[in-house]
Structure formats: structure tokens, C-alpha cells
Image (cartoon, rainbow, N blue to C red):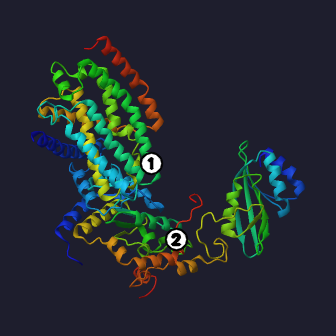
């Protein structure tokens, strides 16, 4: 029962925290571009407005895909530990691999539903998103594997406990930096927002989404951001109690926003070349260091 | 007229053209319709290989349509305007799409806006206009205002604002 | 006008604070939008953001003259948008034809084909005028007066008849898509 409450609390925190942070991110981008920018609660207004519209459906595969994307991502957000063993809803199943597999359900649901809309831009966007996943997941998974090898556990809250002596980022700085670069790709922030490129493929997978579907996918995106940044905070920044966890979360998000607001967009093949070049090589180097025991 | 251009004009004298010098690097050559293709071929062989534009002018008083080919040379930057006049009531000409493939589209456009038929070019689908139901619109006897009134209704104003503005400006007495 | 329920009033106040405009421009008014979007006038502070597809957008900007070929695509686009949707007509071309009043391919008044909520006078309107129009539209949405999408539903036959009178037929036959 306590686990259920904690999981629900996870969802509530994810919803309000990430939606406010998205608004703050828009504000930061605006200030960097010397604009005033929208108020911080703008994304709440956007979301509720989207949910109040009268949408079009594109068949049951489309409907089901959107629900599957939302459900899969919510399920993933429920098992994420928020910084410490106490804020871990399901201590026996917060294994990294469980999270990765659950997370794939949401991504596949999105791919299925959006291709089901029948719009060619959606298909191009989905294929770009999957290609991008191929790009960033390879270095990311190699870094995470070396982390798991180093600490001899894949459970997230145990990894947090192992980092009491020092953050993983400081133990293997190379790996931490690679993981952050991969995180930028996961978040779909600016140099890597290839899948949703609005100027080229009309916002990609979201092309056919109207009204409520757009709102539901926005919520899914909110939970996805929560999962991705939480994983980085837990695995590399050592978690911490709830307050510290929030601070680290906000710092990582603001850093990502600031980097993304000054960069243009990669083309798809440039992105693959980028990820499979230096980051992948450094990830292998990091794995080699971990195997040889040359960690700080 | 640059040196190379005057040499070319000498070559073209066998077609007995009417040569006009528009400015230093631009020369207009008017020839009879049956010699146009030969003139264009000669010019193309002598460096004027770029068809910049192909267009048409309606001379309604002479009952003639004037076809103009503008050729550009990438070697000396000169321009030749090859012009010819064809009958307006039964406009027919030959295509130059063998010389310049891009001429296909210019010919479609001229067919659409002036009603000229190009023999040899059978792809004469409308290029710009959709569901056009009148005479070609760039002919001088087409009244666009009349057509606009018929097809696109104007806004009805409750008061005559133009008259009021004229009174305001003191042009007429109200 | 019908009385709105409390939920519609709440939804309208959300709609007025978050207007996603379709990034589709016709004619010369497109030139006035970059300054309206960027640092000088910054329309994002009102919650107005550009969107790439008609499905996501709330507001359609007709930025200048519309010829018959474009009008077909505009009608398609308008009908693809999700209710509630709003239209702003820019400049004198959409009001009465402007300098194209006697053109053989340019329409003379926009509200004959799709319902228009706000017109901006001028040739072209400056960004200040555009922001003023956005504010006016937000006010109208908040009060529930911007009901162009309802009028389009109720008078669909009238609008269709006008469209067919000027266009012949509304379907797009495009040689590049057949």
C-alpha cells in the first residue's frame, strides 16, 4: 500500500515539477535571446487548453498507441527512485534493465500510434526518432554497463547508496560527461531535436495530433523527461535526500536548456556521426578504465 | 556592343535581322518566325547557351503576338533578345524544348497566359491557373476587372467612403 | 448568444492565454511576423507560439492577398484544424482586395469563404498593430465572442456555396500529387 502511495507521489511530483521546469526553461531561453518570455506556468495553460479542444482521431491504432505511450511512460515514472532508498516505490524492481524495458513500451506505443495516423511526416519523424535512439543509446548503455560493472549492482537505489563515498560523476568523469551528452539526445533538446524538427518535417511524429491527443502526448513527454533526468541524477550525481534530489534535477535541466538554447539543429546523419564518433570512443575508453580499475 | 557580340551579329547577318542595341551588353534581334530556331541554334553554338527567359507580348493594335527569347552568355556576360512576331488570331509556333529542356515550362506558361500553341510540345497542362474558364488572362482584350466582379464579390459598404474621403480632401463639394 | 457553462468559461480563459498559431503565410504579411516573434516585440510573452501543422494550431493567420489557388489550400487547412479555431485577416487585401481589387486570380473579401474573427487594417500592418489584434482576439475569446468556428458549422452550406462560386470546385488537383 505504501508503495502505491509512493508511486502516486512520484507521478504528482513528476507532473508538477517537470511542467513548471518546462515553463522556466522557456523563460530561460527567452532571456538568453533577450526576450521577456512566457510566464513560468505557461505550460500548464498550454496543456489544459490542449485537453479542452475537440480533436480528430485517426483510427483505433492511433488512439491505442497514444494511450500505450502514456501508460508505458507513466509505469516507468512510477518505478524511478527519487534520490534515496526511502523514495523508492518498488525497491525490488528498480533495476536499470527493468526501467529500460518499461521505457521502451512507451516509445514503441508512440511509434505505433503515430505511424498509424497515416501521415508521411509522422512516419519520417518516427524513423528519425528510432535512428536517434540508436545513436545515443549505444554510448549511454556502454557507460551504464561499466557503472554497473564497477559497483556490481544494477539496482538504482543500491547504486545511490554505493555513491555515498563520492559521486559516480567524480569516480568516472569521462562516463558522466558522455552520459550527459546522451541525455541531451534523450531529452530531444536543441542540437538533437531531429525527430520533431518543426521547420523540416512539420513536428515529425506529432503531425497528426490534435487537441486531447496532443495534451496526452505532452503529459507523456513530461514523464519521459522525469525518467531521463532522474536516471542521470540517481546514477551519476548520487541522488541525495528529497531536497537535494530536486536541486540536482533542476540544475541538470537548466544546464540542458542553456546548452540547447544557443545551438542549431543537427541533420540526422550528422547526429549519428557525432554520437558514434567521439562519445562512443570515449565510452569504450571509459569501459576500459573501469575494467582495469583505473577509477578515481 | 562588345567585340565578340559584334562578331556574332555579323555571323547572324545571313538571317537578315533587324538589330537594335539596347545597351552595351544587350542586343535585340528581330527576325521572321521561320528563322528563329536557326538564329537560336547559332547563338547557342557561339556561347549564348543559357535561356534566361522566354516570354510573350500582346500587340493588340497590330494583331500580333511577340515572342521573346532572352539568351545569356556565361563567357562575356552579354545578352541577346531574339524576338519574332506571330499572328495573333491563330497563334502557332514551334517548340525549342530540344535546345533547352527548361523551355517546356516557359511554353506551358505562355500557352496558359497568351494561348500560343507550340508544335512538338504536347504537354500543355495548365501550370499556374486552376480551372480557368475564360480567354487567356494576359491578352489585352481580357478585362480582369469585369472577371473579378463576376467571380469575386466585393464588400458592400454602408456608406460611400471614397466619396467622403474626396469631400474631406476638398476635391469635390459634398 | 447562448449562455456558456462554467467549464466553457474556464476553457475559454485557458484558450485565450495559449494561442498556437499555424506557421503558414501567404502574401507579404509574412514579413511582419519575424519581428513580432523575435526579441523586439516578443509575442511568446502572451503565450502565442508558432506550430508547424494545422492539427495542433488554434489560429490561422491570413497574411495578405489570397489567390484562388492558395484559397483552396487555405480552406483545406482551415477544415483540418481542431475546434475551436480562429482566423485573423491581415491587411487590406483580405478586407476588400486592396490593390488587387481587380485581379483575375485574387479574391476580394476573405469572410465570404471562411469566417474571420479579427481583421487588421493597413498595408501592411506594423507589428504593434498585430500585437494589438492578438490582444483584441484574446479579449474576445475570453468573453466567448470569437465564435467563427461555430458560424462555419452553422452556415456551412452558405460558405461552401460561396467557395464553389469563386473557385469552381474546392478539391485540389495537383500534378505533383497525382
User: Looking at the image, is mark 2 or mark 1 nearer the viewer?
Assistant: 1
A84 in relation to A103, above or below: above
The quadrant in which the C terminus of chain A is found is: top left
Residue A212 pos. (x, y %): 29, 57
Residue A279 pos. (x, y %): 38, 25
Residue C110, quarter of picture:
bottom left
Q: Residue at x 51, y 74 (%)?
A: C101
The quadrant in which the N terminus of chain A is found is: top left
Q: Which of the pair A129/C33 is nearer the observer?
A: A129
Determine which residue is flagged by label 2. Answer: C106
Residue A72 pos. (x, y %): 28, 44
- Same chain shared by disc 2 and disc 1: no
Disc 1: host chain? A
Are the residues tagged 2 and 1 within 8 Å (C-beta)?
no
Which numbered circle lies on residue A123?
A: 1
Residue A177, quarter of picture:
top left
Amino acid at each position: 500500500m505504501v508503495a502505491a502511495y509512493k508511486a502516486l507521489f512520484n507521478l504528482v511530483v513528476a507532473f508538477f515539477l517537470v511542467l513548471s521546469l518546462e515553463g522556466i526553461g522557456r523563460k530561460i531561453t527567452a532571456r538568453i535571446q533577450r526576450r521577456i518570455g512566457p510566464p513560468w506556468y505557461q505550460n500548464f495553460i498550454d496543456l489544459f487548453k490542449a485537453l479542452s479542444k475537440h480533436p480528430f482521431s485517426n483510427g483505433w491504432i492511433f488512439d491505442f498507441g497514444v494511450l500505450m505511450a502514456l501508460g508505458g511512460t507513466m509505469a516507468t515514472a512510477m518505478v524511478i527512485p527519487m534520490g534515496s532508498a526511502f523514495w523508492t516505490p518498488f525497491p525490488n524492481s528498480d533495476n536499470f534493465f527493468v526501467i529500460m524495458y518499461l521505457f521502451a513500451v512507451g516509445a514503441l506505443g508512440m511509434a505505433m500510434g503515430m505511424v498509424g495516423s497515416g501521415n508521411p511526416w509522422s512516419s519520417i519523424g518516427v524513423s528519425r526518432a528510432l535512428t536517434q535512439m540508436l545513436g545515443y543509446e549505444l554510448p549511454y548503455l556502454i557507460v551504464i554497463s561499466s557503472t554497473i560493472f564497477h559497483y556490481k549492482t544494477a539496482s538504482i537505489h543500491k547504486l545511490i547508496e554505493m555513491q555515498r563515498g563520492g559521486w559516480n560523476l567524480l569516480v568516472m568523469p569521462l562516463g558522466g560527461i558522455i552520459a550527459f551528452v546522451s541525455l541531451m539526445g534523450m531529452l530531444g533538446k536543441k542540437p538533437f531535436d531531429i525527430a520533431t524538427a518543426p521547420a523540416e518535417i512539420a513536428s515529425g511524429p506529432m503531425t497528426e495530433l490534435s487537441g486531447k491527443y496532443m495534451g496526452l502526448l505532452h503529459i507523456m513527454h513530461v514523464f519521459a523527461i522525469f525518467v531521463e533526468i532522474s536516471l542521470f541524477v540517481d546514477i551519476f550525481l548520487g541522488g541525495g535526500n528529497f531536497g537535494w534530489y530536486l536541486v540536482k534535477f533542476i540544475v541538470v535541466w537548466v544546464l540542458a536548456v542553456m546548452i540547447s538554447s544557443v545551438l542549431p539543429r543537427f541533420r540526422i546523419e550528422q547526429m549519428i556521426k557525432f554520437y558514434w564518433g567521439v562519445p562512443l570512443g570515449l565510452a569504450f575508453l571509459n569501459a576500459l578504465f573501469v575494467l582495469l580499475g583505473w577509477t578515481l | 556592343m562588345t567585340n565578340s557580340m559584334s562578331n556574332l551579329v555579323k555571323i547572324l547577318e545571313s538571317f537578315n535581322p533587324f538589330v537594335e542595341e539596347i545597351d552595351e551588353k544587350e542586343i535585340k534581334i528581330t527576325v521572321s518566325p521561320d528563322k528563329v530556331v536557326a538564329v537560336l541554334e547559332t547563338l547557342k553554338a557561339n556561347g549564348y547557351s543559357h535561356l534566361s527567359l522566354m516570354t510573350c507580348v500582346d500587340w493588340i493594335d497590330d494583331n500580333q503576338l511577340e515572342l521573346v527569347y532572352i539568351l545569356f552568355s556565361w563567357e562575356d556576360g552579354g545578352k541577346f533578345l531574339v524576338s519574332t512576331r506571330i499572328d495573333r488570331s491563330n497563334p502557332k509556333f514551334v517548340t525549342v524544348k530540344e535546345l533547352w529542356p527548361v523551355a517546356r515550362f516557359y511554353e506551358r506558361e505562355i500557352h496558359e497566359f497568351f494561348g500560343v500553341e507550340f508544335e512538338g510540345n504536347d504537354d500543355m497542362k495548365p501550370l499556374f491557373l486552376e480551372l480557368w474558364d475564360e480567354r487567356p488572362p494576359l491578352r489585352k482584350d481580357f478585362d480582369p476587372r469585369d472577371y473579378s466582379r463576376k467571380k469575386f464579390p466585393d464588400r458592400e459598404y454602408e456608406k460611400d467612403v471614397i466619396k467622403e474621403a474626396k469631400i474631406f480632401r476638398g476635391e469635390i463639394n459634398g | 448568444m447562448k449562455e456558456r457553462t462554467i467549464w466553457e468559461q474556464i476553457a475559454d480563459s485557458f484558450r485565450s492565454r495559449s494561442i498556437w498559431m499555424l506557421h503558414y503565410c501567404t502574401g507579404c504579411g509574412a514579413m511582419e511576423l519575424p519581428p513580432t516573434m523575435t526579441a523586439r516585440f516578443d509575442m511568446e510573452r502572451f503565450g502565442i507560439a508558432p506550430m508547424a501543422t494545422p492539427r495542433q494550431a488554434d489560429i490561422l493567420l491570413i497574411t495578405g492577398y489570397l489567390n484562388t489557388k492558395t484559397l483552396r489550400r487555405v480552406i483545406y487547412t482551415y477544415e483540418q484544424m481542431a475546434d475551436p479555431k480562429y482566423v485573423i485577416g491581415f491587411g487590406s487585401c483580405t478586407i476588400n482586395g486592396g490593390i488587387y481589387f481587380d485581379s483575375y486570380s485574387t479574391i476580394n473579401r476573405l469572410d465570404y469563404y471562411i469566417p474571420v474573427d479579427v481583421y487588421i487594417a493597413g498595408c501592411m500592418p506594423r507589428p504593434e498593430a498585430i500585437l494589438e489584434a492578438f490582444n483584441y482576439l484574446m479579449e474576445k475569446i475570453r468573453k466567448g465572442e470569437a465564435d467563427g468556428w461555430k458560424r462555419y458549422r452553422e452556415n456551412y452550406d452558405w460558405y461552401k456555396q460561396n467557395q464553389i462560386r469563386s473557385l469552381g470546385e474546392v478539391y485540389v488537383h495537383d500534378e505533383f500529387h497525382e
